Amino acid sequence: MNPPATTLVTPPRDAGGVGSRQRGSVSVELAILSVPLILLIVLAIVTGRTEIAYNALTVAAHDAARAASISRTAQLAEDEATAVAHATLAEQGLSCQALDVQVVTDQFARPVGEPAAVTVTISCDLNFGDLGLGFTRQVEATFASPIDTFRGRA
């Protein structure tokens, strides 16, 4: 004996019921949620670029302070630190709107045998104009490197 045939019954469409009231609601929800989502993505990009810039500045400050600490004179230390900072940032691919390298060489005047150090502070203004944002953010890194205690200084 054959089993009874089953027929699928589809419910009739309701011309003005629940289904027609929800038409287009996904588009509205997507439009509402897209703004915060885009803002979150832009915030992540700004944060990432700032952190990458800070790391590049830290490397540059370290290299510049080390170059300054092995110099014989305070003036040569300033020149070397500035040149090394610019070269390191160029290698890192960091583009600053404004770059400032400050080298503190006061301790070169200390007598031989007394501990001394050179401090380098590098600050960079990052421009976020390419993201459609009209602001800059300053990032800064500082590093101090000891001067050889028993080496002659001028």
Image (cartoon, grey):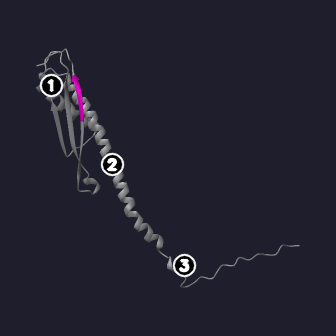
Q: Nearer the viewer, mark 2 or mark 3?
A: 2
Q: Are marks 2 and 1 in contact (CB under 8 Å)?
A: no
Q: CA distance from mark 2 to mark 3?
A: 44 Å
Q: Residues within 10 Å of mark 3 (few under 14, many from 20)?
A: few
* Horizontal side of residue 31 vs 116, given as left or right: right
The residue singled out by tag 2 in the image is: 47
- Look at the numbered disc 2 and give the secondary structure of its residue: helix
Decide whether the magenta segment is chiefly helix, strand or loop. strand
Q: Is residue 123 magenta?
A: no
Residue visible at 29% across and 38% down in the picture: 56
CA gap, disc 1 and disc 3? 80 Å
Task: Give, as a single range, the part of the protein colored magenta.
Answer: 142-146
Task: Give the amino acid at mark 1.
Answer: Gln
Mark 2 Cα shell of 10 Å, populated few (<14), some (14-19), many (≥20): few
**Residue 137 horizontal/vertical position (percent):** 24, 49
Q: Sequence-wise, which precedes: disc 2 or disc 3?
A: 3
Q: Which residue is mark 1?
A: 107
Count residues near mark 1 (Cα–Cα under 10 Å), then give few for <14, some for 14-19, many for 20+.
Answer: some
Residue at the limit of the structure toward the front, as seen here: 114
Using the rendered view, name the quadrant where residue 133 is placed: bottom left
Element under label 1?
helix
Between marks 1 and 3 in the image, the one whose residue lies nearer the viewer:
1
Q: Which of marks 1 and 2 precedes in the sequence?
A: 2
Q: Earlier in the sequence, mark 1 or mark 3?
A: 3
Q: Relative to 8, is 34 on the left or the right?
A: left
Picture quadrant of residue 69: top left
